[in-house]
Amino acid sequence: MFLELIAVIFAGMAAAGVVMLLNRTLKGRLPRWMAPVAAGLAMIGVTIASEYGWYSRTVAALPEGLTVTETVENRSFYRPWTYAVPYIDRFAAVDTATMKSHADHPQIHLADIYFFGRWAAVTKLPVWLDCSAGRRALSSGTAEFSGGLPEGLNWIEPGAGDAILATVCGG
């Protein structure tokens, strides 16, 4: 966040400097308000580019085995351009590389789901997934396969279009 603030400030200073250099070249023919307006527009432009580029930069930096399952688009009234082109500010990813399966029940998986958000810390959540029944449950306590299946889980059936089950179960 700090580096983005520095980038925005430098973009504003650079745009104002270019306008002042252009004004000097034109021997003072540009209006005086042109430099601060150019600085403000450059700062807004860099901020917008940073917001729209966050998702692609973050996904490109994900380790192998982390598969994006769901994204959340953002629209805000104080950012009217987001109604035309919304940007992604949150997403969930399943760690398929470290996913575990039960030896006696190969359709039951234990996977970690990571939740990423713009300006938020990454959250990890272990989830039980039952591919045969199309259901999932949040893990309670330490999530491990012991002698049998865990008991007392609160299973939910999210429906056929659930992206997490589709990613883990292959469709």
Image (cartoon, rainbow, N blue to C red):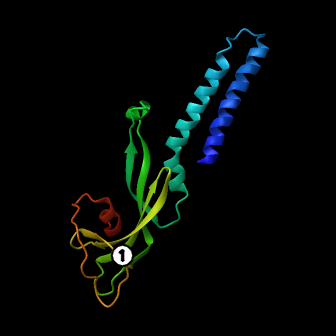
**Which of 107 and 13 lies nearest the eye of the viewer?**
13
Q: Residues within 10 Å of mark 1 (few under 14, many from 20)?
A: many
Q: Is residue 11 visible?
A: yes
Q: Quadrant of residue 19?
A: top right
* 77, above or below 27, in the image: below
Horizontal placement of 116 versus 147: left or right?
Answer: right
Q: Position of residue 132 (x, y in %)?
A: 23, 73
> Can you identify the residue that label 1 sits on?
110
Query: Can see residue 171?
Result: no
Q: Residue at x 68, y 36 (%)?
A: 10
Q: In this rendering, is residue 112 above or below 46? A: below
Nearest to the observer: residue 126 or residue 53: 126
| Outermost residue, bottom side | 147
In which quadrant of the rendered view does residue 40 lie? top right
How many numbered marks appear? Answer: 1
* Quadrant in which the C terminus appears: bottom left
Which residue type does callout 1 highlight? Leu
Mark 1, secondary structure of its residue: strand
Residue 150, image quadrant: bottom left
Question: For this rendering, which residue is in front, 73 or 63?
Answer: 73
Report the residue at 73% width, 25% height from top: 17
Q: Where residue 43 sits: x, y (%)? A: 60, 32
> In the image, 148: left or right of 121?
left
- Name which residue lies at 28% across and 59% down: 162
Give residue 157's position: percent from left, percent from top: 21, 65
Q: Position of residue 103 (x, y in %)?
A: 33, 86
| Residue at 75% in and 10% down | 28
